[in-house]
Amino acid sequence: MGNLLSKFLRIKAEDELRVPRKEQSTPQMVSLSVKTVFALLQILEDYIVDHETLTPIQRICLQAYPRLINYGEGFDDIIEANGAHGNAIPAEIDKQMQDLFGKMYHEELSLREILELMRRYKTSRDPAEQDLFTCMIHGLVDEYNCYHTYPLEALTKTAVMFGGIINFKLISGIPLKVGLGMILDAVRGHEPHQPMYKFGVEAIEQLISRLPEWAGFCNLLLQIPSLQGTPIYRKAEEVLRDQGHRPINESDGAELNGLSDGIAMTNGNIDELLATDTAHRKFSSLHVDPPLRPEIYRDPDEEAHDKILFILNNVSEQNIEGKLRDLKDVLQEEHHQWFASYLVEERAKLQPNFQQLYLELLELIGDKTLWIEVLRETYVSAIRLLNAESTLNSATERTYLKNLGGWLGSLTIAKDKPIKHRNIYFKDLLIEAFDSQRLMVVIPFTCKVLVQAMKSTVFKPPNPWLMDILALLMEIYHFAELKMILKFEIEVLCGDLELDYKTIEPSTCIRERPAQLEDGISSANIPEGLEAFEDMSLNNITRAIRNERIPQASIMPTLPNLDQILVFPPSASSMTDPSALRQIVHSAVERAIAEIITPVVERSITIASISTAQLILKDFAMEPDEEKVRQAAGTMVRALAGSLALVTCKEPLKMSMTNYIRVIQQEFSDQPMPEG
């Protein structure tokens, strides 16, 4: 699946690229929208087998579909509208980009001014400025192969800008992975005297403050001999030491295969450059909403900045009314995002004893949009820590995460306001943590959030939402191999909520997941084909599936009678009783079907639904009759799901049937089973 999808995307991207390269006037195939390519790249990250092929595919897609660069950052409606008539950037936008870069190279604009412009364009609601931001980043990626021809001064400016873009977080996700990969290739693939090596080193020096975020990237830098003894090499060593890893020159001969404590060699796989992706995947049950009004937000000037900090440094219960008036005088709406981020990152996260004071200050300010921004920044900070690999290894960061959990609960459930599933889906978060061995991070955070229910009239026990999560916690408490400190966290939570943890009925969410087998057959008997099939996940789609499982009991009665389908040819062997053979095969086929039917149906429907949604929205864009669109979608989903289920289940079903025949035969007499 991964290889086919990557080939499909490469073919489509290469066809798109022939237009700007003047090899053809228009694409020869039906163009994909940026929304479709974005979705397919997300799916590809789940299905691809050979990760070495992933980064080149991402890079060519970025070149062919430039609007991917800022897609998924809260401006998708503008980006999709810009690409409604094609994926190419308009010529006038390209000319503006060349003019701006020309002014930079001729020193009419400073690098800082260019980066400030790009920061503004990135969050602009103006369609032209969105395209201009895309065009500027795309130009740097597209020109990479020509950098070696640049004069040294121009190449140095380009490197500083390239690193600055990453340092100031102007790109993320796929563009960030592609950018880091290009920098790594420049240093790793060239000698120190070559221009491209100098480009790579200069770019890394611009983003060196962000190296702690990417332990995997630091690991790769330590594999480059020419960097030894440089500030970059020392910083990479420092990052690994601070995060509990031994630098490579202390790893007892592990240079060839990776660090001895589990940081494996990635061989250039840029998917593993980000620290949060090195050892584990990001939680799919977490999501941050976009800022409310990014077009107006900006940092305060130095005078306003100092006044606000002075007020927060000196506020107390006794003078809060006076400080409130001072704060309202200086805090403008355009400063809300900065203020929210500062309050969360520098105050609530680090000063749990003053959280109630800051909550009271927010309530007295009485600005709903500011409250929403503070809540959003709380999600941003908490989700960053939940996903970070370093949180697993740092007791300090886990303490910060617990502080944020208490703060989040105080902002929401303590005020009778829900934590929406789209932001944090606690049940899935706990299940993902259980599967990925990150309960040490997730359980304390969850407990700190839930304990605030004791202050609520809506969410205190026996609120169903709360009790559902508690039941899952009790299942983990009783049936997972938890450390005593985590069990204690759960016990304290129940005590604070005035519940006896011994009387809470554990859920069966983990123990009775469809992946587990019934009838006492051990997992060792599962054919390899089924294991591979179980790995077919679809990012956040699997979260929805888990909550809307198709019961096996509702599927089995709809299947035809096996007695009317199974045909037994006459056997030349007299060693086996025909009636016993028929009974064994019938039972084996029935068990094999029961085992794979639910995952086959669910995944086939999910994949078919995604594909249908993309195609129907495109093909029926001008259709006014909603019912006609629904009928077309239903027909297509049924056809696609049926075909996909047929293709994907053949080999697993065959292997499972063979396996069950061998297992069930042992239940009969000592009669040997004929092979073949």
Image (spheres, grey):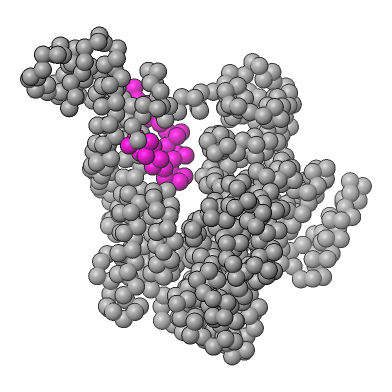
Q: Position of residue 25 (x, y in %)?
A: 27, 78
Tell me if residue 533 is in the magenta stretch: yes
Q: Position of residue 472 (x, y in %)?
A: 57, 27
Closer-to-camera residue (62/302): 62
Q: From this viewpoint, is residue 311 visible?
A: yes
Tell me if residue 246 is in the magenta stretch: no
79 versus 6 height, above or below = below
**37 on left or right of 394:** left
From this viewpoint, which residue is outermost toward the front? 253
Q: Position of residue 219 (x, y in %)?
A: 59, 58
Closer-to-camera residue (484/513): 484
38 versus 584 height, above or below = below
Q: Residue at x 39, y 42 (%)?
A: 536
From this viewpoint, which residue is outermost toward the right? 318
Q: Position of residue 231 (x, y in %)?
A: 69, 69
Q: Residue at x 67, y 51 (%)?
A: 246
The magenta stretch is 529-553
Please tell me whether the stretch drawn in magenta is mainly helix, strand or loop. Answer: helix
